[in-house]
Image (spheres, rainbow, N blue to C red):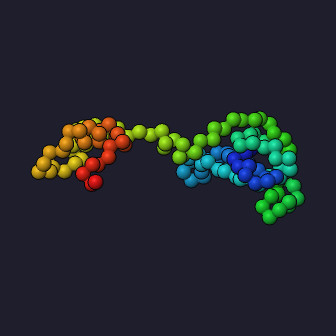
Amino acid sequence: MGSVVRVKQDKTAVVEMVWKQRHRLYRKQVRRVARFYVHDPENQCRLGDLVRIEETRPISKTKHWRLLGILERRQVAEVRPIDLEGDAVTVVTESELEDAVPDMDEDIDPELLGLLVTGNDDYEDDEDD
């Protein structure tokens, strides 16, 4: 028994079996992982499913196991890291901004400072025209 971790290939699923074993010398539990390439002729496995497999004749270079049945269907959220980063907002307070900007001889325009703090992207620099 193991759980399906990848189903990108046609008629193939990668099943991972995880167990814990006590280290002989240090007596600490060690996580052991075995990955099997499983023949899934009907592409019925989905990510996260709990499946039963059995060893069989070599089907390809790395595939030596076949799918006997799906014991339990599991739902796995597919979230890419880029989706999570898009929602992140950086908030900078006025005091942090003043600390980050080095001291200058002339004061910063308060209107410009307000736009920097609020993060207004519509501001256009009229002096470069």
Looking at the rendered image, the quarter that the C terminus falls into is bottom left
Q: Quadrant of residue 91?
A: top left
Looking at the rendered image, the quarter that the N terminus falls into is top right
Q: Quadrant of residue 97?
A: top left
**Residue 98 visible:** yes
Depth order, front residue of 108/68: 108
Determine the residue located farthest toward the right in the rendered image: 57
The reply, left or right, for residue 68 in relation to residue 111 is right
The reply, left or right, for residue 43 in relation to residue 90 is right
Determine the residue located farthest toward the front in the rendered image: 129
Depth order, front residue of 88/49: 88
The residue depicted at 49 percent of the width and 42 percent of the height is: 86
Residue 104 pos. (x, y %)? 14, 51
**Residue 52 visible:** no
Residue 61 pos. (x, y %)? 80, 64
Q: Quadrant of residue 37?
A: bottom right
Depth order, front residue of 105/92: 105
